[in-house]
Image (tube, rainbow, N blue to C red):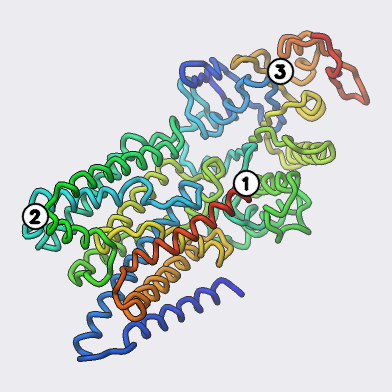
């Protein structure tokens, strides 16, 4: 289990994340939602040790993240950020194979190749695995990066706005795959999302943030209702039930 | 063509250029000319490898393909040390006559300069690495102005000696110093052997590298130090060659489309050996020593640099 304990981060004295404590339940999809500047990505970066917290701590299996050996941690928790500019020309398969680095240290074994094959299969990248990343569309590239994280074979997968710049079809595709990872392989997914409807339809738990503070942490059912949404977004957001999904109709809302 | 085939071809090219340089038009005593030529060849191999290695490493950690380790002002530091020596002690002093001493002082000053810079400015959690590079560049320019100031005041005869010390040239290399440089290179390669694959991961950028379990910030620091030591070694040996690392590193990226640093560094090294020996051959036999190799390198390198800038701006625009 990942426990976030009283985490605070300031950027030049301005608090971006303030005193947040959240537990990430294993075997669920947990979404971080909130307006721009809520501190969602910063929180995710601290959980995945891309960023050091000012105060507070993050525990993985009761041990502080900073105390973990970096390769051991990389076998348990993976993180994918939104901007992935790469300077070298890589094929999809080469990129995915990098996911095995914590295990193989760059010398792939037969077992590593098997994980790479599976990850490519999982993300439907079979027919483009030998193409170069710079020849792919945004959605295909995003899938290749997610495949790398899948090949990394970690219990926890943290994703920072993976749906950015993706069209509806690819967004749905990726969210379905994440759901499958949780349901079939028992992974835990933590994801920063902008579209609350994706959060509502696909996640088990939601962590709502605003101005660096925790607004509410609960099951999707608890969070997706007009009162709490107003508290988060300062908007009147009616919620409609459709085929068992709660859909927030915010497009013409009065603030 | 596979990368291993390309490497073998380049290696054959290296052998050919060494043979050509070694045996072409030997007049007078073979016993006199040949060992001298081989000393130059050894100097070119050592500096070629040192520059290629440090540039490829430096470009990976800065995620930028038009920077070289010389931007942080290591070359200017070399000029400062030599100018100060000529200014205060003079060309007949032990600091110039004793090549070991001169080499040692220069190399230590350059490495100390780099270390100080990193010590105060390498804060990856606070500032981006570009701040370090920019301030290094500014300090480099400042040192350059200081050098020019001292050079104006210096005795003209002393200045001639200083100038020949500062221009990159393989003809005046002292064989004794080659052993020291070679030793440093070997140490750098032993260390590099353990981090080559980490460098491959680092080319994915900071966040992906940390995700894959790389101790990123510490490795960047170690790599900055490594590339500074290598650049300092080559500069103390033959003088500063600004554009050279840039050319060979980029040739290597274009020729071997790969992320593997073992291939990239080896490729860049082979390119640089061919280019240096070929350039020196031109200087000695075609231009008959009317110019130095650094002039040619800066001319060709400058053109290539402009080409790269245009290409990069088109790629990002």
State the separation of the CA atoms marked 2 and 3.
78 Å
A209 lies above or below B75: above
Tell me the SS state at disc 3. strand
Disc 1 or disc 2, which is closer to the eye? 2
Spot occupied by residue B254 in the image (x, y as percentages of width and height): 56, 63
Q: Which-is-in-front pick, marks 3 and 1?
A: 1
Residue under disc 1 on the same chain as residue under disc 2: yes
Q: Distance of mark 1 from mark 2, alpha carbons?
A: 50 Å
From mark 3 to mark 1, how far is it between C-alphas?
43 Å
Q: x, y percentage for residue B189?
A: 36, 62
Query: Where B68 falls versus B296 (above or below)?
Result: above
Q: Does the CB distance between marks 1 and 2 fall below 8 Å?
A: no
Residue B242 position by quadrant: bottom left
Residue name at image x 37 percent, y 71 percent:
B276
> Residue A218's mark?
3
Image quarter of the C terminus of chain B? top right
Whichever of callouts 1 and 2 sits on the residue coming sooner in the sequence is 2
Residue on which disc 1 sits: B316
Q: SS for tag 1? A: helix
Few, some or many residues within 10 Å of mark 1 (<14, 14–19, 20+): few
**Chain under numbered label 2:** B
Crowd tier of the residue under label 2, counting other residues whose Cα lies within 10 Å: few below 14, some 14–19, many 20 or above: many
- Does residue A110 appear anywhere in the picture? yes
A25 up-or-down from B255: above or below: above
Instruction: Establish whether labels 2 and 3 are both on one chain.
Output: no
The residue indicated by pointer 2 is B90
**In this picture, is B248 found above or below A194?**
below
Side (left or right) of B205 relative to A208: left
């Amino acid at each position: 289990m990942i426990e976030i304990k009283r985490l605070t981060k300031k950027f030049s004295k301005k608090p971006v994340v303030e005193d947040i404590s959240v537990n990430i339940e294993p075997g669920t999809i947990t979404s971080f939602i909130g307006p721009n500047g809520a501190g969602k990505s910063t929180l995710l970066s601290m959980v995945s040790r891309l960023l050091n917290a000012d105060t507070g701590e993050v525990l993985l299996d009761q041990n502080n993240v900073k105390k973990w050996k970096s390769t051991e941690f990389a076998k348990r928790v993976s993180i994918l950020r939104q901007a992935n500019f790469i300077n070298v020309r890589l094929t999809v398969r080469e990129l995915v194979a990098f996911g095995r680095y914590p295990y193989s240290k760059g010398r792939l074994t037969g077992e590593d190749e098997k994980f790479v094959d599976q990850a490519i299969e999982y993300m439907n990248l079979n027919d483009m695995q030998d193409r170069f990343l710079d020849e792919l569309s945004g959605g295909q590239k995003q899938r290749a990066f997610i495949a790398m994280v899948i090949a990394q074979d970690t219990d926890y997968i943290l994703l920072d706005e993976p749906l950015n710049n993706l069209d509806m079809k690819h967004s749905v595709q990726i969210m379905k795959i994440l759901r499958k990872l949780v349901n079939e392989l028992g992974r835990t997914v933590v994801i920063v999302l902008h579209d609350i409807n994706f959060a509502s339809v696909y996640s088990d738990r939601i962590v709502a943030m605003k101005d660096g503070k925790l607004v509410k942490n609960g099951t999707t059912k608890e969070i997706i209702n007009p009162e709490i949404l107003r508290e988060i977004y300062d908007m009147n957001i009616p919620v409609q039930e459709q085929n068992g999904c709660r859909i927030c109709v915010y497009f013409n809302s009065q603030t | 063509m596979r990368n291993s085939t390309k490497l073998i071809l380049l290696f054959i090219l290296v052998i050919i250029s060494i043979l050509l340089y070694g045996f072409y038009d030997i007049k007078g005593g073979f016993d006199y000319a040949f060992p001298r030529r081989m000393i130059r060849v050894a100097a070119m191999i050592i500096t070629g490898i040192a520059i290629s290695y440090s540039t490829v490493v430096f470009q990976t950690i800065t995620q930028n393909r038009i920077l070289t380790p010389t931007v942080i002002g290591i070359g200017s530091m070399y000029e400062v040390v030599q100018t100060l020596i000529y200014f205060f002690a003079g060309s007949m002093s032990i600091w110039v006559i004793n090549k070991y001493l001169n080499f040692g002082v220069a190399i230590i000053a350059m490495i100390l300069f780099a270390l100080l810079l990193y010590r105060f400015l390498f804060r990856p959690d606070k500032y981006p690495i570009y701040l370090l590079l920019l301030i290094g560049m500014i300090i480099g320019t400042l040192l350059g102005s200081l050098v020019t100031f001292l050079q104006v005041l210096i005795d003209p005869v002393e200045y001639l000696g200083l100038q020949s010390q500062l221009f990159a040239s393989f003809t005046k290399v002292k064989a004794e110093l080659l052993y020291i440089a070679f030793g440093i290179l070997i140490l750098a390669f032993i260390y590099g052997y353990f981090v080559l694959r980490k460098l491959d991961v680092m080319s994915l950028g900071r966040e992906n590298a940390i995700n894959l379990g790389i101790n990123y910030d510490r490795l960047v620091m170690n790599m900055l130090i490594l590339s500074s030591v290598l650049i300092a070694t080559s500069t103390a040996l033959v003088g500063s060659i600004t554009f050279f690392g840039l050319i060979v590193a980029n040739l290597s990226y274009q020729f071997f489309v790969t992320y593997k640093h073992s291939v990239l560094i080896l490729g860049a090294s082979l390119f640089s050996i061919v280019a240096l020996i070929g350039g020196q051959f031109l200087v000695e036999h075609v231009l008959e020593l009317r110019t130095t190799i650094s002039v040619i390198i800066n001319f060709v390198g400058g053109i290539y640099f402009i080409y790269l800038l245009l290409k990069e701006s088109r790629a990002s625009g």
